[in-house]
Image (cartoon, rainbow, N blue to C red):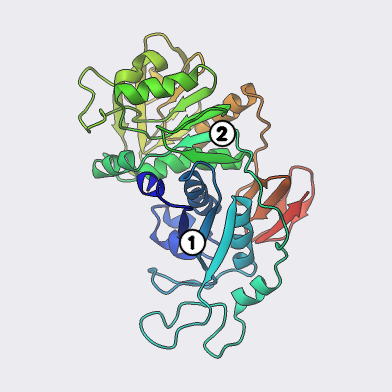
Amino acid sequence: HYKNAELLDFASWDSYPLGQVERSTMSEADKVRWARTGHPDWVSWNHDVYRGLKGRRAFWVMEQGAGQVNWAPSNCIQAEGAVALWTAQAYAHGASCVSYFRWRAATIAQELMHSGILRHDETLDRGGQEISRMEIAGRANGTIPAKIALLHDYESQWIYDIQPHSANASYINQTMLFYSALRGLGVDVDIRHPDSDLSGYAVIVSPAIQLMGADRAAHLARYAAESAFVFGPRSAYRTATGRVQELGQPGPLRGLVGQRLLNFDGMRPGLTVHAGGHEVETWAEAYEPTEAEVVLTYDDGPLTGQAAVTRNGNVWSIGAWSAPLITEILERILGEAGIVTARLPEGLRVSHNGNTEIWMNWAQTEAVLPDGSTMAPVSFQFRG
């Protein structure tokens, strides 16, 4: 996508939040939890990816679902307010156009049960009614003021998923651990390619960039001199052509991160260990510091006493799959970088578009904001 987008005037994608839940790799419990609204971070992830394809420029949602789809394993009807919330979120992440699919529900062919703005009889369906009541017209589409860049690379995604080594491990699941932690701290995120210009970011997060040659390592090291840098598990495990780093991992990053990889533990579902008091599942890798300081060690299991998290100046390495641990470490890093954070309840998210602050409650229960005010279920608020 990054290469293809170079020749485009703008990038676009098709957003179907309910179908995305059904086809995702999230747990069955999460699929039930988000079946009627979509998952806030899985949708916004794509908004941020496509905004980043053209270097932080506006994008389009070429097809926005107006209700339930017909092509997923299950096709739930959406919660009241969901279609309006999806539209507000697209604006919140910098979309300059939201084009709905479809105008009228089809009366022939294979998508007879796919929602449209209009029902088969040409009356407004639930989603169409929400769209007709929306008040976004006239709001400026400004710059997303992200101070954090998260690195994303399709080649690393492909090579990761060919050999996941653990049943629940995947590139997107690992990356979402870091992305959801950041969004849950109330901060805006730019998603950028690791070889792009990363100037001006206070924090750069690299959750799962496996492919690392000397040129890419040198490129990233230049930014680590001024920005906090965070590497996740399996970072630089392979060379730029896909070979394992034969002199050990993390190959050309070793001087930057100040450690070397010792062992990794691809755990089966239900098997866990602990690090720094946090439960770790799916993946645990341990480091031997060469220059870095040890921040957290494993409390139990085969890697007991070995480093799970290290720090070498501005550069951090996190080897444990643990949402609470990752949130705790990122909260500390952002605080040191002067970025204000707030731990948000599950389903509550905030984004900034220019001078407008957009609060979104994806939960089907009332949400309490950090200022003590409340939001109705499946709703959004513009402030500023």
Q: How crowded is the residue under tag 2: few (<14 C-alpha within 10 Å), some, or many (20+)? A: many
Which label is found at residue 43?
none
Instruction: Measuring from the top left, give residue 295's x and y in whole percent.
Output: 49, 17
Find residue 202 and report its image quarter: top right
Alpha carbon distance from label 1 to label 2: 24 Å
Task: Report the residue marked by disc 1.
Answer: 15
Amino acid type at mark 1: Ser
* Percent x, y of residue 37: 56, 62
Q: Which of 231 and 222 is in front in this view?
A: 222
**Residue occupying the point 33% across, 30% down:** 234
Residue picked out by circle 2: 148
Which residue: 50% across, 13% down?
313
* 1 or 2: tag closer to the N-terminus: 1
Residue 326 shows in the view: yes
In the picture shown, does residue 276 fall above or below 31? above
The answer to whether residue 351 is left or right of residue 263 is: right
Q: Residue furthest bottom?
A: 121
- Crowd around label 1: few <14 · some 14–19 · many ≥20 (10 Å): many
Amino acid at circle 2: Ile
- Vertical order, 276 against 279 (above or below): above
Looking at the picture, does residue 134 appear above or below residue 369? below
Give how far across and how far down residue 247 sits, in percent: 22, 17
**Image point (55%, 84%), residue name:** 119
Location of residue 73 by image quarter: bottom left
Q: From what the image shows, is residue 324 above or below residue 139?
A: above
